[in-house]
Amino acid sequence: MLEPVDLVKGFYAAVVAGDVPGVVALLHPALRWTEARGFPYYSGTWQTPQEVVDKLLVPLLRDWDDFSATADDFIVAGQRVVSLGAYAGTNKKTGKRMHAPFAHVWQIADHKLQRFDMYTDTLLIAAATA
């Protein structure tokens, strides 16, 4: 059985590998996923793994070249994990590069990623899209 931090690290590894089925397999069916307000793909709290695919992964692939979400520090508190890192990528429409630090707060339930809350400087991301 994977530890909570290993589930979170597995999520980032699956995203980097472009492994959408791997991402979905890690997500709890009763998901609560909230992007930061002001993030280009924010639309409230998503409640299914398919919403993460349709409203986040597909648009990221459509809108960014070399998009990455690299977490390099993890704080574990029981079934909660905070990951610290940075987003990077080049916007396909503008050609502008972006680098924005993030904090992600994950909650684990039933050995799956059940809740995600994103904190980032959305202005840095928006600047690359304008």
Image (cartoon, helix red, strand yellow):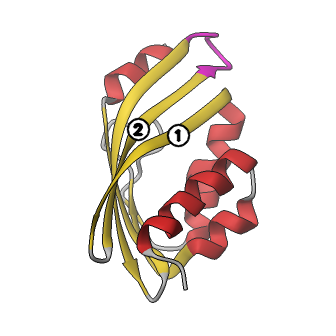
- Residue to which mark 2 is pinned: 85
- Residue to which mark 1 is pinned: 69
Q: How far apart in space, not on screen, are marks 2 and 1 (Cα)?
A: 7 Å
The spot of residue 38 in percent (x, y) is 33, 36
Q: Amino acid at mark 1?
A: Ala
Q: Secondary structure at mark 1?
A: strand
Is the C-beta separation of discs 2 and 1 under 8 Å? yes
The disc, 2 or 1, on the residue closer to the chain's N-terminal end is 1
Residue 31's label in the rendered image is: none
Q: Amino acid at mark 2?
A: Gly
115 over 66 or under it: above or below: below
| Mark 1: few/some/many CA within 10 Å (<14, 14-19, 20+) | some
Q: In the rendered image, which quarter is residue 44 located in?
A: bottom left
- The residue nearer to you, when weighing 85 against 87, is 85
> Which segment did they paint magenta?
90-96
The spot of residue 103 in percent (x, y) is 32, 45
User: Is 38 left, or right, of 41 in this rendering?
Assistant: left
Q: In the rendered image, which quarter is residue 10 located in?
A: bottom right
Residue 93 among those drawn in magenta: yes
The spot of residue 33 in percent (x, y) is 41, 63
Residue 11 among those drawn in magenta: no
Q: Secondary structure at mark 2?
A: strand
| Mark 2: few/some/many CA within 10 Å (<14, 14-19, 20+) | some
